[in-house]
Amino acid sequence: MSIPSYVQMISPLLQFLGHQTTSVPTILIHEEVAQLVGLTEEEKTQLLPSKTQQVYKNRIGWAHDALKRAKLSSSPKRGEWQLTEEGRKLHTKFPDGLPLEECKKISLT
């Protein structure tokens, strides 16, 4: 298995955040989303070419950026994320995960 693209990370990120009642620290989000997508310990250690960050954390970050631009998520405090009311509505509509086409639309926002 390879590390999902940031577009592919949108659905599991939305799914995880949709089950939370308050904002969640990114440290926890990274671990939970990695588990949701089935990353191995080896995959979690892969670094960007710049060697400054793990690939999976970077992609989850970009997935959150896409959700924020689409007004589906917010960062109420530094290092914490949560869904907006619109994000919660979308999660309710797709409780088992967003179809890839929906993720692609969000990534273009």
Image (cartoon, rainbow, N blue to C red):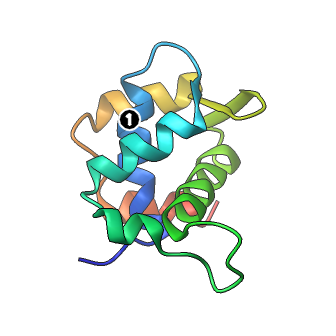
Q: Picture quarter containing residue 77?
A: top right
**Residue 13, percent from left and from top:** 43, 45
Residue 72 visible in image: no
> Circle 1 — which element?
helix
Q: Picture quarter containing residue 81?
A: top right
**Residue 20, percent from left and from top:** 43, 20
Camera-side residue: 109 or 96?
96
Residue 20 visible in image: yes
Q: Picture quarter containing residue 58?
A: bottom right
In this figure, which residue is indicated by the disc labeled 1? 16
Quadrant where the C terminus is found in the figure: bottom right
Image side of residue 74 versus residue 44, left or right: right
**Residue 105, percent from left and from top:** 50, 62
Instruction: Name the residue located 37 percent from the left edge and 52 percent from the top edge.
Output: 34
The residue most toward the bottom is: 49
Image side of residue 10 versus residue 101, left or right: right
Camera-side residue: 104 or 18?
18
Q: Amino acid at mark 1?
A: Phe
**Residue 37, percent from left and from top:** 28, 56
Label 1 crowding class (10 Å Cα cut-off): few <14, some 14-19, many 20+? some
